[in-house]
Image (tube, grey):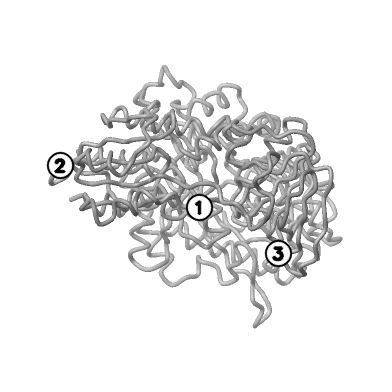
């Protein structure tokens, strides 16, 4: 196949172990998609469809979902924590047959597939009775020599099961708080026997597992290690240490490639990086470690565009680039790039709803900007049986998505937006320092999408019920968003009291000493605090909940809090505002009821969530024959709630054949 003139490094061949690839972007292992390899048949079908979509979109090497290796524990011990799975999934009754079906599908589509093996550290096993970071404090069980021997055998037996099912590559998850990472790291490995105390001893368990897996499989197969680039905790794996590990494993001759990922031990560098980190920010670090091996190296970490992947490859910082969230936002991103249609690609903006929804709320998998992510039961939009005139009121995520969905089905769509630009509150958030490099990208993409679909967009159009009725639309969708909620406090009408929304829009400019009152579980209060602090102001965040922004999971919160602390932002937990008296405010502890005053406060910023702006809907209900309410106008939630409502409503009103 000819090398692309546009992206010559991305679309060039490379050999990785037994894999002959024609391109250098891979979709690595991740648990997204909402399906299940071993679950009920409908979830298995969703799993197959999820990964087939990525192959159809141009992926040649996919990771599939991770599989848990069984781990020993005392009878009756209940494993807890992220990723706790004592019984493992590889030993599940239908695992081998389902995996064989999956690999057959992958191979028939002309692609390769990896099976990744993992055991989460601390659930309950660790090399020592030592913690891996400062976020959680469950002391692990120090793995005994007998348990180590058992684990090596279990990894080998698991590899045989997986290889017999036909996978092309095996990958050991030795990063992101995995038990194997804990053994490799001097921060968590405090052993004094043959499995700790030196770099060679620290890597002994992984080396023995690799060797036994090779012996067990009994056929040529690609085998890789996925490692942290470094641990940003004192005494952890630094770049030089990882270089030594890589050099030693390379010398063993039993590993075919390395996959490097960013992320520390639940600290300031999340394992799944939000969009306010630069694309490929840690690729130079990967390049330094790459110098220690002649084996292919994969870089993974906040790469949202194929163009950035091209830069990383061109700089020699990696041989391949892994892009998982890019494929969640748009499974067609690779095909678009190969065909010179990258402008059509919906780029990931790093909202992290794909991980935070599940971690913080127990919600199903979803993406804030791509409502079809993980929902293969919604095929591409088909032409409507009956073309209708549709009027959408509101140009935020819900309104623009519904307008696009209906236009893609062939309906005549008009969209009225009261502001001078599309985006709604999302556009306001995009003006904040923390989001300014990526949120506007999606708004521009969505606007271009509407234009290409001939949606009649009218800006600066404040809709009244009379206007809507006069428009004579067959279907009206009210997506008018929400307005800032004001807390139960007195003195809020004073000139030094402003809303976070007005700060984000630039309508209000805080000054002096700022106190931001947070009664919102989403990230907005913290992102606004970051924005205000960047102006050089003294900021204190008072949050009514015990912890800030409870809907922001451990995969994201550390990075935001690190930014705030670096700027001197102070926090007061479990307190609410009860009164503003000029430059003095009164707070009340939400549990004990104790009250106290903060003085010398120049600006009070209210970040207390929002209330649905649903008045127009109620005016039209019973008057217009078909009017619908969606997005924040129904109930303010994450962006994924709004865009999914838009898809669901479009499918209900104009289902695909």
Quadrant where the N terminus is found in the figure? top left
**Residue 98: x, y in percent?**
38, 63
Label 2: state its secondary structure: loop
Report crowding for label 3: few under 14, some 14 to 19, many 20 or more residues within 10 A (C-alpha): many
Q: CA distance from mark 2 to mark 1?
A: 34 Å
Residue at 31% from the left image edge and 36% from the top image edge = 415
Mark 3 or 1, closer to the camera: 1
Residue at 45% from the left image edge and 55% from the top image edge = 635
Q: Please name the residue that numbered disc 2 is placed on.
A: 387
Q: Quadrant of residue 401?
A: top left
| 580 sits left or right of 90 in the view | right
Report crowding for label 2: few under 14, some 14 to 19, many 20 or more residues within 10 A (C-alpha): some
Q: Which mark is residue 122?
A: 3
Task: Kindly tell me whether residue 593 is visible in this rendering.
Answer: yes
Residue extending furthest toward the bottom:
76
**Residue 251: x, y in percent?**
69, 40
Marks 2/3 in contact by CB < 8 Å: the verdict is: no
Marks 3/1 in contact by CB < 8 Å: the verdict is: no
Q: CA distance from mark 3 to mark 1?
A: 42 Å
Report crowding for label 1: few under 14, some 14 to 19, many 20 or more residues within 10 A (C-alpha): some
Q: Which mark is residue 366?
A: none
User: Measured along the vertical axis of the image, is residue 117 above or below residue 602?
Assistant: below
| 201 sits left or right of 419 in the view | right
Label 1: state its secondary structure: strand
Which residue is nearer to you in this view: 314 or 336? 336
**Residue 557: x, y in percent?**
66, 49
Which residue is nearer to you in this view: 573 or 639? 573
Mark sitting earlier along the chain (2/3):
3
Q: Please name the residue that numbered disc 1 is placed on.
A: 611
Mark sitting earlier along the chain (2/1):
2
Task: Kindly tell me whether residue 279 is visible in this rendering.
Answer: no
Residue at 44% from the left image edge and 48% from the top image edge = 113
């Amino acid at each position: 196949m000819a090398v692309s003139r546009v992206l010559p490094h991305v679309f060039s061949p490379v050999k990785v172990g037994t894999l002959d690839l024609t391109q250098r972007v891979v979709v690595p292992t991740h648990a997204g998609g909402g399906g299940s390899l071993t679950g009920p048949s409908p979830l298995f079908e969703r799993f197959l469809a999820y990964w087939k979509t990525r192959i159809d979109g141009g992926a040649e090497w996919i990771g599939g979902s991770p599989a848990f290796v069984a781990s020993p524990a005392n009878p009756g011990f209940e494993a807890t924590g992220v990723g706790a799975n004592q019984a493992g999934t590889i030993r599940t009754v239908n695992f081998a047959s389902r995996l064989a079906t999956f690999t057959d599908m992958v191979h028939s589509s002309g692609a390769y597939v990896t099976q990744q093996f993992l055991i989460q550290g601390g659930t309950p096993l660790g090399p020592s009775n030592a913690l891996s970071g400062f976020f959680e404090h469950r002391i692990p069980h120090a793995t005994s020599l007998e348990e180590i021997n058992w684990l090596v055998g279990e990894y080998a037996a698991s590899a045989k099961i997986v290889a017999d099912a036909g996978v092309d590559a095996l990958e050991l998850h030795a990063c992101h708080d995995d038990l194997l990472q804990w053994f490799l790291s001097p921060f968590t490995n405090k052993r004094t026997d043959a499995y700790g105390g030196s770099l060679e001893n620290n890597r002994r368990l992984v080396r023995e597992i690799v060797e036994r897996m090779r012996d067990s499989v009994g056929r040529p197969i690609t085998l890789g290690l996925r490692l942290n680039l470094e641990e940003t905790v004192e005494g952890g794996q630094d770049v030089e240490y990882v270089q030594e590990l890589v050099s030693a494993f390379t010398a063993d001759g039993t590993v075919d490639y390395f996959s490097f990922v960013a992320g520390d031990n639940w600290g300031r560098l999340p394992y799944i990086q939000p969009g306010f980190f630069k694309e490929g920010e840690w690729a130079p670090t990967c390049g330094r470690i790459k110098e220690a091996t002649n084996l292919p190296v994969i870089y993974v970490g906040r790469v949202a565009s194929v163009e950035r992947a091209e830069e990383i490859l061109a700089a020699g910082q990696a041989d391949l680039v892994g892009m998982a969230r890019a494929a969640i936002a748009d499974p067609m991103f690779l095909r678009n790039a190969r065909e010179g249609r990258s402008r059509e690609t919906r780029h990931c903006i790093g909202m992290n709803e794909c991980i935070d929804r599940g971690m913080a709320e127990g919600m199903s998998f979803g993406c804030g900007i791509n409502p079809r992510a993980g929902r293969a039961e919604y095929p591409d939009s088909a032409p409507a049986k009956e073309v209708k005139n549709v009027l959408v009121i509101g140009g935020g995520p819900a309104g623009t998505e519904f307008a696009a969905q209906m236009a893609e089905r062939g309906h005549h769509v008009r969209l009225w937006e009261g502001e001078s630009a599309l985006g709604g509150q999302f556009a306001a958030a995009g003006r904040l320092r923390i989001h300014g490099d990526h949120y506007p990208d999606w708004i521009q993409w969505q606007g271009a999408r509407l234009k290409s679909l001939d949606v009649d967009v009218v800006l600066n159009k404040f809709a009244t019920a009379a206007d809507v009725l006069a428009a004579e639309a067959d279907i009206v969708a009210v997506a008018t968003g929400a307005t800032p909620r004001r807390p139960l406090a007195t003195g809020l009408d004073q000139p030094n009291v402003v809303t976070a929304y007005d700060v984000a829009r630039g309508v209000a400019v805080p000054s002096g000493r700022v106190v931001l009152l947070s009664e919102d579980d989403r990230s907005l209060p913290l992102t606004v605090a970051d924005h205000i602090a960047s102006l050089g102001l003294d900021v204190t965040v008072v949050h009514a909940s015990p912890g800030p922004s409870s809907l922001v999971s451990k995969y994201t919160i550390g990075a935001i809090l690190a930014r705030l602390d670096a700027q001197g932002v102070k926090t007061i937990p479990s307190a609410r505002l009860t009164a503003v008296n000029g430059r003095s405010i009164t707070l009340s502890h939400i549990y004990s009821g104790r009250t106290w005053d903060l003085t010398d406060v120049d600006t009070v910023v209210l970040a207390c969530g929002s209330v649905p702006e649903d008045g127009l809907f109620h005016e039209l209900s019973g008057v217009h024959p078909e009017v619908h309410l969606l997005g924040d106008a129904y109930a303010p939630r994450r962006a994924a709630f709004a865009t999914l409502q838009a898809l669901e409503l479009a499918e209900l009103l104009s289902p695909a054949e």
